[in-house]
Image (cartoon, rainbow, N blue to C red):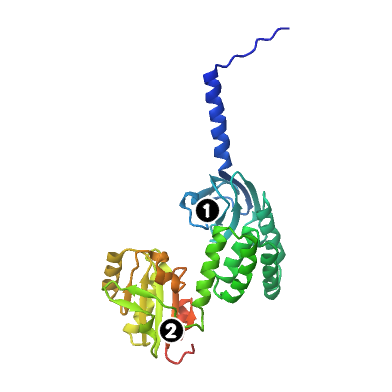
Amino acid sequence: MYRMRSYCPPLLQLVLLSVLVLSCKSSGKRFHLEGEIKNLNQGELYVYALDGNKEQTDTIQLEKGRFVYDGACEQRTTLMLVFPNFTEYPVFAEPGGKAKLKGDATNMKEMEISGNDDNEAMTAYRLQVAHAAPPDAKVLTEKFISDHASSPVATYLLRKHYIDTQHPNYTKASSLMAHLRKAQPHAADVAELDKQVKMLLAASVGKRLPAFKLTTIDGNTITEKDYQGPGKTVIIAYAEWSNEGMSMVRRLNQLLKDNKAQFRLLIISLDGNKEKVQRFKEQQELRGQMACPPEMFDAPAVQALSLTTVPDNIIVVNGKIVARSLPIERLENNLTPGQQQ
C-alpha cells in the first residue's frame, strides 16, 4: 500500500528546528521542584536564592498539600524555601535539574528531598542528626562537612552552623574552610565565604577593633582610634527594612536618654539613603555618631567590622572587642551597671 509522504517546506523545517533548540536551551536553564506536604493543605511558600539573585525570588502557592516551582537557573545555586511558620529549608538547584520534596508539616526535621546527589546528601544528613543529642549532632556536622567538601551542602552547613548562628565559632569555621578550599578551588561562593570567615575571625571577641574609617552623616571622619579609651562603645548596624534592627537602635538610645547606661554609640545604617537616616535621627533624637555608607554591606568599613547581617552589634572596651552579635536583652544587660560583660 502506498503511503503519501508528508512534505515540510525547508523554511518551516528551519523554524521548527529553531523552536526545538530554543526549547531545549530554555529547559536547560531552569530548575523544577515539586512538593507534597502533609498537614499543610493551603498557603504560600516563599523561595529566594542564598546568593541574592532576585530573579529566583518567588511566591509559591500550596494547594491540597502540593506545590510546583519552576524557575530560572543558569548555574548551581542554593535556594531557600520558607514555610508559613518561617521554617527554612535548603534546596540545591542546578540547570536543567528536577527535585521532589516530601514531608510532614508536623515534623519538618524529617523532610526529604530527592532528585540529585546534593539534595539526597542533605536529606541523609538531616535524618542522621534529627534525633542526635547536640554534642553528637555537632560531631556529625563536622564530619559531614569534611566528607562532602566538594558539595554545596557542605558550604551551606558551614555557614548555617558556624557563622550565621547565635553562637558562631569562627575558629572552627576557618579550620573547616580548608577542606572546602581544597575541594572547590575555583568556586566563587567558597572564595567569598573564605574571605568572610577571615574577616569575622579578625573581628571576633577578644581581638583588637580592626582598622576602619567612616564618614558620619554630619561630615565627620571617625576611625577605630576614636574608640581606644576606657568605657564601653556599642557599634550597631541596622536598616529600616528590619523591624528588629530599628527596635534595637531605639532601645539603645532610650538607655542613654534615661541615663540607665553610659556608653558611646556608633550607629551604621545599611539602607544607603542618607536623607532618610537624617530624618530618623531627628525624629528619634538619636544620640551618638551616625554613618550611612553608600556602598552599604560592601563598604570597606562594614566589611572590616564584619557586619554581615542586620541587626548586628559590637561592644568595645579599651579598643578590644568584648562581645558581638548579642540579642537585645543580653546587649542591655551588658550595658546596664551591675551586669557582667
Residue 195 picture location, percent across and down: 52, 67
Query: Mark 2 Cα within 10 Å, few/some/many (few <14, many 20+)?
Result: many
Residue farthest along the right direction in this orientation: 1
* CB under 8 Å between discs 1 and 2: no
Q: Position of residue 206 (x, y in %)?
A: 51, 84
Label whose residue precedes the other's in the sequence (1 or 2): 1
User: Measured along the vertical axis of the image, is residue 230 above or below residue 184?
Assistant: below
Residue for point 51% across, 81% down: 205
Dot label at residue 47 = 1
Task: Please state which of the two labelled residues, at mark 1 or mark 2, is closer to the viewer.
Answer: 2
Circle count: 2
Residue 289 picture location, percent across and down: 32, 77
Q: Secondary structure at mark 2?
A: strand
Kindly tell me whether residue 155 is visible in this rendering.
Answer: yes
Left or right of 255 in this view: 183: right
Kind of residue sitting beneath label 1: Val
Q: Quadrant of residue 307?
A: bottom left
The quarter of the image holding the N terminus is: top right
Q: Residue 170: x percent and y percent?
A: 57, 74
Q: Which residue is mark 2?
A: 316
Name above or below for residue 1 compared with residue 88.
above
Q: Residue at x 49, y 82 (%)?
A: 323
Instruction: Work out whether residue 275 or residue 133 is closer to the camera in this orientation and state it.
Output: 275
Q: Gap between marks 1 and 2, in whole Å?
A: 37 Å
Tell me what residue is drawn at x 67 percent, y 72 percent. Answer: 138
Look at the numbered disc 1 and give the secondary structure of its residue.
strand
Could you say which is closer to the camera, residue 83 or residue 20?
Answer: 20
Mark 1: few/some/many CA within 10 Å (<14, 14-19, 20+): many
* Residue type of the residue flagged with mark 2: Val
Check the image and name the residue furthest to the bottom.
338
